[in-house]
Amino acid sequence: MVRVPDKSSPVRAHGRRSPRDLVAQANFAPHFFDNGAGSTNGNMALFSLPEDTPVGSHVYTLNGTDPEGDPVSYHISFNPSARSVFSVDPNLGNITLIEELDREREDEIEVIISISDGLNLVAEKVTILVTDANDEAPRFIQEPYVVQVPEDTPSGTSIARVRAVDRDTGSAGSVTYFLKNPHSSKFSVDHHSGVLRLQAGATLDYEKARAHFITVVAKDGGGKLRGADVVLSATTMVTVNVEDVQDMAPVFVGTPYYGYVYEDTLPGSEVLTVVAMDGDRGKPNRVLYSLVNGSDGTFEINETSGAISVMQSPSQLRREVYELHVQVTEVSSAGTPAAQAMVPVTIRIVDLNNHPPTFYGESGPQNRFELSMYEHPPQGEILRGLKITVNDSDQGANAKFNLRLVGPGGIFRVVPQTVLNEAQVTIIVENSAAIDFEKSKVLTFKLLAIEVNTPEKFSSTADVVIQLLDTNDNVPKFTSHYYVARIPENAPGGSNVLAVTAMDPDTGPWGEVKYSIYGSGADLFLIHPSSGIIYTQPWASLDAEATARYNFYVKAEDMEGRYSLAEVFITLLDVNDHYPQFEESVQEKTMVLGTPVKIEATDQDAEEPNNLVDYSITHAEPANVFDINAHTGEIWLKNSIRSLDALHNITPNGDLTWSLEVQAKDHGSPSFSTTALLKIDIVDTEMLSRSPMAAFLMQTKDNPMKAVGVLAGIMAVIVAITVLISTATFWRNKKSNKVQPVRRVLRKRPSPAPRSIRIQWLKFRRTKATDKFVLKEAPPNENCNNNSRGSTPPPQAPAPPPPPSAAPSVGQAPWTVPTVSGSLAPQQPQQPSPKPRAVAKRKAVGSPVQSALVSELRQKFEKKNVQSKAYF
């Protein structure tokens, strides 16, 4: 302990202190707390720290005190030769790790810690133990591992040992060994010693694999590293080189062996060389060659090189193929024969390819062949006029060649296609349609012969020329399937219409064409048999209005009856040869003031503009009264005339009747016209409004059928209403046999006054129910209704014109619409009952069904009336 006096303490003036001052000036040194092992604060006694503690970690807290209670400060220092691995907070005493720890390099750390109260400083030397962590992987020593093993080593033999060390302690420093791929290896390793062995049942073979590569893994026992359990490992490669031993027979290389002796080979020439080597490649023995059999003295072999030579001239050889057997023998290092092997050798005597294929005719070699034949021969026919032979003078493969035709494809084929030495050439028709005189009069091909399996590929050619002869194989064909012509309808007889053309590609008389026409529309026309000109009959009179179009067929035929057809369409051009025609030359029209009348003329010409008609007023007296639409023929009064009074002033005699001369003129060239006289009666709209029937008849004056149709419709509606009323009344009374509403009314009205009314009503009910409704006849020639006696009848309309008579069908009565000229009305007490007459009228004009309905209704009402009397 070192005590340092405080320089600021008081001192006497003479330099001497009194005893009292000495007692007051005494100061005790600070000291550390000793908290023992396992404590993280104090004086670091028996403190240990794992080597994997992260840098910057707070690892310990220095803790001490001063007897006087003065504040203390802390310090830490190291030997000059040691690393400074800690730092301390001087005020708090917190110690922080500032350098990485490594137990394997430094397992103890000596530090000097000190505490000071500012006057006294106390220092202590402490030793900090660095504890182990599993931070070191196993490491193989004595690498690389390369061992030499003979291929005949027995299984289970130890071949090498690997060793790895781990500098960690405890289980983290223990090492075990494994193979990386144990299932695909012929070797095994002892897990503890690292000894490699050849597995039981496994053998080595130098010829199959000269080296094996084994991956060995060394693992430690595992341990903590930064709080986690880890297992570290390392690998090494063991190379096992297999040493060869003499256990294999010699082996020939490049089998099978084939040799060729050509016809110009000299005796003594080398034919081929066989090569063999010891099957044990590591330490091969020397080999010797020999011929065993098959030579017959014709061939010899060099015993060291394996070269086989021919000893005779090829012309003296009697066989085409020789089968030799060559034996190879190993010679050991001691000079004694060892393993042997044998191989067959085939030597073929080959002819030189010095002759190309050659074509021959009947008189010798020939390179052009000609033939005449008709076109379109039957498919498969042989061209017998060609006598062709092909030959190759070489032998064997040199005499093999292919034949083919070069030219337009698919027409002919040649047989045979492959030839050995010599063959007769046959040409066969393949496509008869392509052999056409009209397309090509001469067919030219080249007959090619080319060798197949020779390197020279010798070849030769011969021209084949075929002259085609024509046959009648074509049908005359028109230049078009349809012909269209137009001629004026006033063309005279014998006029040309059009010319048709058909072509026949055949030559000579087969190519001549004859024309004819037929069909329902050909009566008025003729055709020239050679030129194809169609013209009208000399007596033909054409009329576009009668027949505007003609359609018939034209036929082109050769001398053997081959023909084709075309269709002809002839249209007659309309000529303006008809005048416009009015329905009548004198017409009468009634014009309602403000409404036009129409006049119409038709032109029988077939086409526009000949049948278009324009209208005009050529003469009127007085003039400037009417206008006419030039296109429709509608005539109306001029806009200045708006009343009958204006017409009275214009008309000389005031009878409101005019006569007009109207002209209809067509658009043809030249133009034709026709006139008609039109008489017009003019009526006012006010007069028509006072009498609707008169207006209707005036409007239908020009069309009486319209009036007949309207009247027939009105009568049909009246009949339908009558039938509906009768049917409804019948079904209503059929639903009940008692008049129940009357009974209920009597019970609900006890007062006497309404009873008198009810009695009167009942009296009325006692009359026959059928008398309530009667059919009243209308007066002759009247259309009025007589329901009300005091009403004034409406003005009478003029009688409509009679309908046009229609001839009834034979054997059948004419059908008429049943009508009723009357009305349904309640019977008045003071008038006589018209029942018999009405019933008779209905029976006379109604149908049997209506009569039956009326009778049934009458019986029903009488029955109800009797029941009512019985009730009261």
Image (cartoon, grey):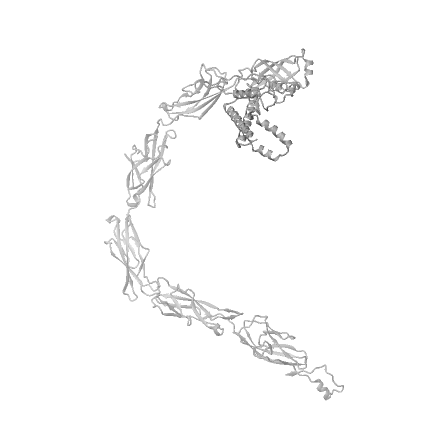
Where 518 falls versus 142 (above or below)? above
Quadrant in which the C terminus is drawn: top right
Q: Is residue 634 visible?
A: no
Q: Nearer the viewer, residue 342 or 394?
A: 342
Quarter of the N terminus within the rendering: bottom right
Image quadrant where residue 253 sits: bottom left
Q: Position of residue 807 (x, y in %)?
A: 49, 17
Q: Which residue is nearer to you in this view: 610 or 683?
A: 683
Tell me, yes or no, if residue 686 can be seen here: yes
Which residue is farthest bottom?
Answer: 19
Q: Residue furthest top?
A: 653
In this image, 345 relative to 795: left or right?
A: left
The extreme right residue here reads 13
354 in relation to 591, above or below: below
Q: Nearer the viewer, residue 786 or 739?
A: 739
Q: Is residue 641 placed above or below 270 in the rendered structure?
A: above
Q: Position of residue 169 (x, y in %)?
A: 49, 74
User: Image quadrant of residue 424?
Assistant: top left
x and y percent of residue 189 in the render?
40, 69
Q: Is residue 141 left or right of residue 70?
A: left
The image position of residue 528, as x and y in percent, is 42, 19
